[in-house]
Image (cartoon, rainbow, N blue to C red):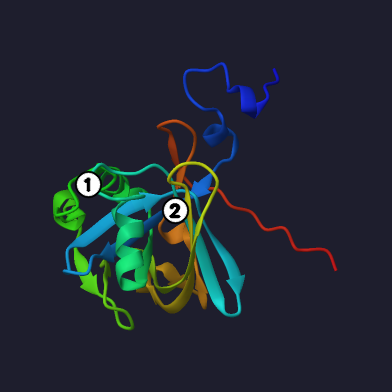
Amino acid sequence: MFYNTKDGHPFRFNPLSAIVTPRPIAWISTQDGKGVRNLAPYSFFNLTAYDPPQVMFASTLTKTDQIRSKDTVANIEATGVFCINVAELASAEAVNKSSAPLPKEMNEFEHAGVEQATCETIDCVRVANAPASLECCLNEIIDLPGENNHLVLGFVKAVHMRDDCIRDGKFEIKTYRPLTRLGYQDYSAIADTFVLKRPK
């Protein structure tokens, strides 16, 4: 099977999201200039550098009540801050519920029944019981080719880690099972891990 992306794919759904898997989920909390809080999951997400610590996520498509992009990007443009909360298997239903295209005046924390906590270094809230949360400030938003494709780059200013996720001086993913995005409407939770030492 082969297809040229400029000609489009022959399937009902785009296979690219099923090919590039698993993808970590950034459960991003923001608020607009009036303090209306928002929570939404993004699977085009990753860590990009250690020093200074930096992250990225990409947003695609838009909403009818936003000029461009979605509430998350609009809020980051307005305030310059956001918080990336790690998604886990235990919060899968709430993560999915928070992805609903609600009116921008609605609070997804309340809609999904997610407890909020105040961030320490930025004017934003975070998911109170997340395994980890990264308080971030905006570096740059890059408009990508195509309609409403935006790459958000940020600096990590502070880190929260849930105490039960720390074992033997390490943040241990086996304690919470990270939720990951696969293709289509499929998800997975990481359970099996193994160690490979990098060659010298």
**25 sits to left or right of 7:** left
Rendered position, 143 above or below 180: below
Residue 53 in which image quadrant: bottom right
The number of callouts visible is: 2
Residue lying at 57% horizontally and 33% vertically, measured from the top left? 16
- Residue 165 in view, yes or no: yes
Residue at (34% x, 44% y) in the render: 62
Could you tell me which quadrant the C terminus lies in?
Answer: bottom right
- Name the residue rendered at 35%, 50% in the picture: 68
For badge 2, the amino acid type reads Pro
Secondary element type, mark 1: loop
Which mark identifies residue 53?
Answer: none
| Residue 55 point in image, percent of width and height | 51, 66
Q: Is residue 102 left or right of residue 169?
A: left
Look at the image and tell me in which quarter the N terminus lies. Answer: top right
Element at label 2: loop
Residue 13 versus residue 113 in the image, above or below? above
Q: Which residue lies under the disc numbered 2?
A: 178
Of 92 and 175, the residue lying toward us: 92
Neighbor class of circle 1 (other Cα within 10 Å; few <14, some 14-19, many 20+) is few
Question: Where is residue 146 shown, x and y percent of the image?
Answer: 51, 42
Badge 2 local density, few (<14 within 10 Å), some, or many (20+)? many
Left or right relative to 158: residue 106:
left
Which is nearer the N-term, disc 1 or disc 2?
Answer: 1
Residue 66, percent across and down?
27, 50
Q: Nearer the viewer, residue 81 or 86?
A: 81
Q: Nearer the viewer, mark 1 or mark 2?
A: 1
Give amino acid for label 1. Asp
Q: Are marks 1 and 2 in contact (CB under 8 Å)?
A: no
Asked whether 188 or 197 is in front, the reply is 188
Residue at label 1?
A: 65
Q: Residue furthest right?
A: 200
